[in-house]
Image (cartoon, helix red, strand yellow):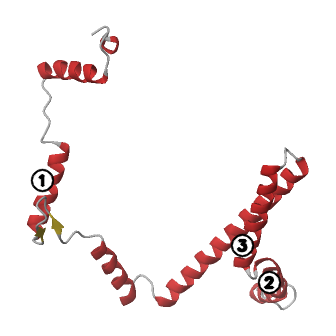
Amino acid sequence: MPVDGNKSPFSLLYTKSRRIKPCLRQFNKEFYSDLQNKVVVAREELSDIQKLCAHTTSDPILIGYEKLCLVKYNELRLAEEALYKQKSRINWLNLGDNNTIFFHKKVATHRMMNKILTICDGSDTRLEDPQAVKGEILRFYKKILGSKFELKRRQSIGSISEVISFLGDSDGGLCKGT
């Protein structure tokens, strides 16, 4: 359906996007070109102002300028972070995505880095058998955490008293009313 005479909505969109493109390029060039250096300069400027504020007693003009520098630095830092995020996504798209050989190799490498293939036991003997590695890990944590803990009613009162006396509550203040 033609709109505005004989122009379709898509051709209007195309025309408008062509008109705005130079303005966006100029905006991008002014504010985001050489972003890394702008971040460094803003950080140095903020650091200098903060040093002056530390030596000067509560000058409201200096404090206001410090706030402006901080806002400017944070905006530039966030823009730089967004730029790096976009670059990483572009690199990822250029190199591959979910169903490529590259992706599957990356996943396999990540999985291999997260596996425990060998371990040394308490006597510095290297264990490589998966069952031996599993057994050593279980033995290690059982040693640290203890065996299965079964709490019986008659043992619990004595255990609680021991813990309280260990914590230094000799007057029984924690156990009043029991």
Residue type, mark 2 in image = Lys
On residue 139, the disc is 1
Q: Nearer the viewer, residue 1 or 32?
A: 32
Label 1 or label 2, whichever comes before in sequence order: 2
Q: Are marks 3 and 1 in contact (CB under 8 Å)?
A: no
- Quarter of the figure that contains the C terminus: top left
- Quarter of the figure that contains the N terminus: bottom right
Picture quarter containing residue 120? bottom left
Which is in the foreground here, disc 3 or disc 1?
3
- Residue at coordinates 76% horizontally, 82% vertically from top-left? 33
Residue type, mark 3 in image = Val
- Residue at coordinates 69% horizontally, 71% vertically from top-left? 79
Asked if residue 154 lies left or right of residue 49, the reply is: left
| SS at badge 2 | helix
Asked if residue 113 lies left or right of residue 66, the reply is: left
Residue furthest top as drawn: 177
- The residue indicated by pointer 3 is 40
- The residue indicated by pointer 2 is 29
Residue type, mark 1 in image = Arg
Measuring from the top left, give residue 82's x and y in whole percent: 64, 72
Residue furthest bottom as drawn: 6
